[in-house]
Amino acid sequence: MTILHHPSAATLGAFASGALDEARAVVVAAHLSLCPHCRGTVKGFEHLGGALLDAVPGAPMSAGALERILARAEAASVAAVPAAVRAVRLDPEPGLPAPLANYALGSWRSIGRGVQWRSVEVASDEAVRVFMLKAAPGTRLPRHKHTGTEWTCVFEGAFRHDLGRFGPGDFDEADESHEHNPVVEDGMACICLVALQGNIRLQSLLGRLMQPFIRI
């Protein structure tokens, strides 16, 4: 597997520091499960964060402070940790990255000719929806823009658009400034995990007529 497209350094740094919301974090975690290069980058950020903490001068603690901190840590639930970065507890479906084993997946449903959609149940505080898309070989998706961010990790197959080819493991990080019309390569279906903030705005006349029925 040759991965050409990776999350930005800012995105990997936010993931390493725990600053990403869970919805986006699960898509980054899916990429990390496939990309040794980015796993190394995240580990480097984590080491840097630890070194910076070590360099902070110590301060006196009040009486009983350590006991109170330990009691709070013990009472904290694992639910406070994003599932995307927890140890996987269930066996993932064949062909899906391990981080998805922590989430309920809906059934595939058609949203257009050659395109299917599947929900991924991830809580989000920033109105980010997580879902999977599967497009048949040769499918040309409508040209579209975004009203927010759209992060995509490819699992199988490949698509192309103005910014290049995206195959297994590749990460496509789009925002309001991007407009593209992905085309799925021939040979096999393309399956992706997507975290979408805001909405997709279809640009063609046919796309605008389809918009109320697609609802993504």
Image (spheres, rainbow, N blue to C red):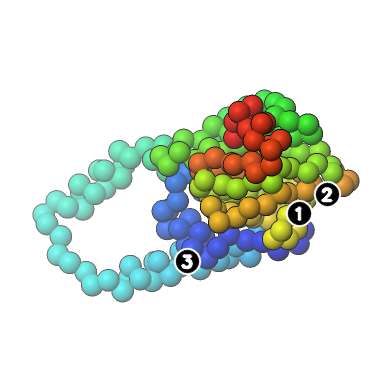
Residue that mark 2 sits on: 185
CA gap between label 2 and label 1 equals: 7 Å
Circle 3 Cα neighbour tier, 10 Å, few/some/many (<14 / 14–19 / ≥20): some
Whether residues under marks 2 and 1 lie with C-beta atoms below 8 angstroms apart, the answer is yes
* Residue 50 pos. (x, y %): 39, 66
Q: Which circle's residue, 3 or 2, is located before the other in the chain?
A: 3
**Hey, what amino acid is under mark 3?**
Phe
Q: Which circle's residue, 2 or 1, is located before the other in the chain?
A: 1
Residue that mark 1 sits on: 160
Query: Residue at left 17%, top 52%?
Result: 65
For discs 3 and 1, the disc positioned in front in the rendered view? 1
Q: Which circle's residue, 3 or 1, is located before the other in the chain?
A: 3
> 216 and 192: which one is in front?
216
Q: Which image quarter holds the C terminus?
A: top right
CA gap between label 3 and label 1 equals: 31 Å
Mark 3 element type = helix
Circle 1 Cα neighbour tier, 10 Å, few/some/many (<14 / 14–19 / ≥20): some
**Hey, what amino acid is under mark 1?**
Arg
Query: Residue at left 30%, top 45%?
Result: 73
* Residue 123 pos. (x, y %): 46, 35
Residue that mark 3 sits on: 45
Mark 1 element type = strand
